[in-house]
Image: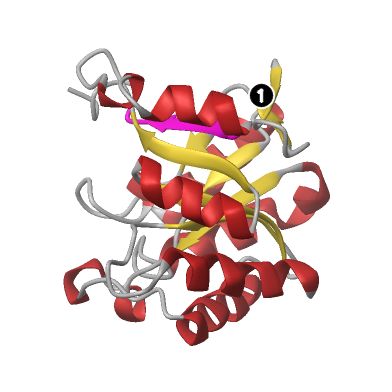
């Protein structure tokens, strides 16, 4: 498996990452736990070291699944998870207030059976919370050793610049496929300018 560095962050990941959402959420019933554990461990055995989850996937179930599956080789993989929704429920709207960010991190550490989150994304930009406050909250978690790197998902150029000015953004995760080329207009040039990695999701057009 080839490896990649996410921008200038120094965070090295496998060229192919595993987005784990569908094991617990969104695309039909959750996968049988035994099958899901086997799949995750098989991915690791085949060279995947980059695993993506979020508190909203379930909610919470997906993080617990990853925590159990990856525990035997936790130090050899990179785990990305996300904050940004009220009570981890996408139907309740966004919540990226600093106290909520801290709570999500503390809870995710327990579910993931780890003492540090490798990459902590804001799941979606919260229009009610200034990006400077969001980045500042994650910065405190970095200082405390609970988070290694800060990421954004589906953020626009202005939000990326404002966040990066407070705490270097390691990666932006956004949809990008043969059917969806929007990041090419403004986002990819900005990421190159700032030295931020790009993590595309739905590379197969949401499994068309």
Give yes or no for residue 201 being in the magenta stretch: yes
Residue 179 point in image, percent of width and height: 20, 17
- For the point 29% across and 55% down, the residue is 25
Q: Which residue in the protein does label 1 denote?
A: 46
Residue 168 visible in the shown view = yes
Q: Is residue 173 left or right of residue 45?
A: left
Taking depth in this image into account, of 9 and 91 the one nearest to the observer is 9
Q: Main secondary structure of the magenta part?
A: strand
Give the percent coordinates (x, y) of residue 114.
73, 66
Q: Is residue 8 above or below residue 51?
A: above
Say which residue appears at 34% left-offset and 76% top-offset.
95
Q: Secondary structure at mark 1?
A: loop
- 34 to 60, vertically: above or below: above
Find residue 3 and report its horizontal and vertical position in percent.
Answer: 71, 21
Which residues are the magenta region? Answer: 196-202
Q: Quadrant of the C terminus?
A: top left
Q: Give the total number of marks visible in the rendering.
A: 1
The N terminus - image quarter: top right
Would residue 72 appear left or right of 62 to someone viewing this image?
right
Q: Residue 194 vs residue 148: left or right?
A: left
Q: Is residue 106 left or right of residue 77?
A: left
Q: Report the front residue among 129 and 47.
A: 129
């Amino acid at each position: 498996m080839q490896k990649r560095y996410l921008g200038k962050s120094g965070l090295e990941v496998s060229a192919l990452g595993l987005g784990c959402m569908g094991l617990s959420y969104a695309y039909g019933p959750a996968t049988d736990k035994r099958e899901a554990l086997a799949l995750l461990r098989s991915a690791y055995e085949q060279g995947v070291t980059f695993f993506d989850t979020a508190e909203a996937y379930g909610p919470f179930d997906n993080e617990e699944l990853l925590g159990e599956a990856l525990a035997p080789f936790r130090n050899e993989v990179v785990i990305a998870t996300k904050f940004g929704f009220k009570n981890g429920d996408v139907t309740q709207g966004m919540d990226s207030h600093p106290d909520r960010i801290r709570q999500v991190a503390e809870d995710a550490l327990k579910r993931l059976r780890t003492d540090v989150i490798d990459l902590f994304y804001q799941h979606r930009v919260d229009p009610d919370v200034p990006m400077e406050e969001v980045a500042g909250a994650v910065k405190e978690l970095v200082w405390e050793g609970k988070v290694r790197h800060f990421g954004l998902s589906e953020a626009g150029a202005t939000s990326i610049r404002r966040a990066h000015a407070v705490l270097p953004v390691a990666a932006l995760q956004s949809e990008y496929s043969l059917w969806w080329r929007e990041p090419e207009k403004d986002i990819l040039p900005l990421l190159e300018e700032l030295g931020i990695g790009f993590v595309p999701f739905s590379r197969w057009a949401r499994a068309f």
